Every structure is written in C-alpha cells, then in structure tokens.
Image (cartoon, rainbow, N blue to C red):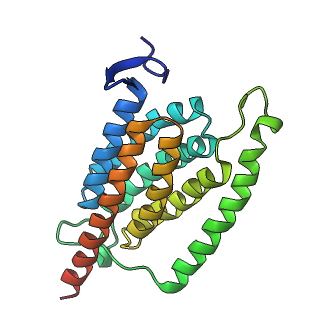
Amino acid sequence: MNFFDHQSAFFTLWGYTMSYLEFFGTLAGALAVWLSAKGKIISWPLGLLNVTLFFFLFYQIQLYPDMFLQVFFFITNILGWWRWSHPNKNEEDQKKELRVSFTSKKVLALLGIAGFSVTFLFGLFASKLHVLLPNLFQQPSAFPYLDSFVTSMSIVATYLMVQKKVECWLVWLAVDVVATGLYFNKGIYFVGAEYFVFCIIAAFGFIRWRKEVFRYAH
C-alpha cells in the first residue's frame, strides 16, 4: 500500500475504486469548507491537511494548475488561521475573532480583472508545461484554461475569505461549478461529488455571512 499513490486502492464501492489520497483529501476538504461556512477557525488546520493530500493527487492526474494552487492554499490557510484569530480592535466580533464584512465595489472590480487576466496567462503557461519541462510534466495539461480559471479565481476567493468578506462565497460558487465538471471528466468522481456539494455550501455560506453582517449592523 502506497498512501500517496492515487492508484493505490483504499476500497471499491459500486465499481468505483477509491484511493487513500482522494478519500482522505476529500473528507478533510469537506469538513473544512462546511466549518468555514459557519465561521469556525478550526476550518483552517483541516484545510492544511486537505491541500497537502490534493497536491499529490492533482500532480498524478495532470491537473497542474490545480497542483500549484495547493501550494498557495497551504500558505493562505496559515495566514487565514492567524487573521481570523488576531483581528484589529475595530474588526472584532463578540468572540474576539475577525468580523464578517462586505467588500467595496472598486475592490471587487479590480479582483475580477486580475482574476481573468491571470486565468488567461496561467492557462497559456499550463498548456506549454509538457513542452517546457518534459521531464517533470510528461503529459499535456488537461483543460489548461478551465483549470486555470479554477486556480486564479480560487486565489481571489481565498483572499476574500482570509479577510472574511461575504463575497468570497459567490466567487467560490463559480469556482465550484467549473471544478465539478473538471473532476467528473477526469474520473475522480468522489472529488467531483464533493465540489457539487461545495456549490450548495457556498450558497449557504453566502446567506449565513450576509445575515451576520446585518446582525452586527443592528
């Protein structure tokens, strides 16, 4: 048994072979997202476990932008953990944690422009990886532009989440819809099903955080 090999079977269910990487990475990710939608700080350490396992998974199935994204997520999980637990005095909620708030339209517009620009540039780069670094990336990147959309807009969503901004959930919803299609197409059905559930959690998170902002306003 090789825990970090996505071909190493943990169990088989209804003809689908589940690897250790996919199962435990997905489980940690699902718990992290659900707890973050409820504003719980423990979501960040669970996220660290999720991204570590998914780094190895995405490398092996040639979703290279997603693989690079896990490195970013690892760093931002640490930053988010610190940011939520160490707010400035004027940013505290009743638990002395970072308070939920809205983002200005100007910032959202700038983040949108940056996100789509990075999508194009990273997609172009990802489509050439097997040519530029053939020893490291032996297979062409699968869906480089869609995968890069997931990557770039996940960065935008994560930035907003670290700052505990309501709009992060709308960006996550767009990311999760695209990611669901990608993962089902690549045959990692458990991860694809997880991201379908993430779409529902993103909607729940948006509604919950939005209500929380108005609760503090009164």
Q: Position of residue 171 (x, y in %)?
A: 46, 66
Q: Residue furthest top?
A: 1
Residue at x-position 38% and y-position 35% = 25
Residue at x-position 42% and y-position 19% = 3
Give the mark count. Answer: 0
Q: Is residue 96 left or right of residue 32?
A: left
* Residue 10 in view (yes/no): yes
Q: Residue furthest right?
A: 131
* Residue 163 in view (yes/no): no
Q: Is residue 181 left or right of residue 83?
A: right
Q: Is residue 188 left or right of residue 68?
A: left
Q: Is residue 56 above or below residue 155?
A: above
Q: Position of residue 17 (x, y in %)?
A: 39, 23
Q: Position of residue 199 (x, y in %)?
A: 36, 58
- The quarter holding residue 198 reads bottom left
Q: Position of residue 122 (x, y in %)?
A: 70, 54
Q: Is residue 171 left or right of residue 212?
A: right
Q: Quadrant of the C terminus?
A: bottom left
> Closer to the camera, 77 or 15?
15
Q: Quadrant of the N terminus?
A: top left
Q: Residue furthest front?
A: 15
> Closer to the camera, 116 or 89?
116
Residue at x-position 79% and y-position 34% = 133
Q: Is residue 86 above or below residue 128?
A: below
- The quarter holding residue 114 reads bottom right
> Closer to the camera, 65 or 218?
65
Residue at x-position 52% and y-position 30% = 56
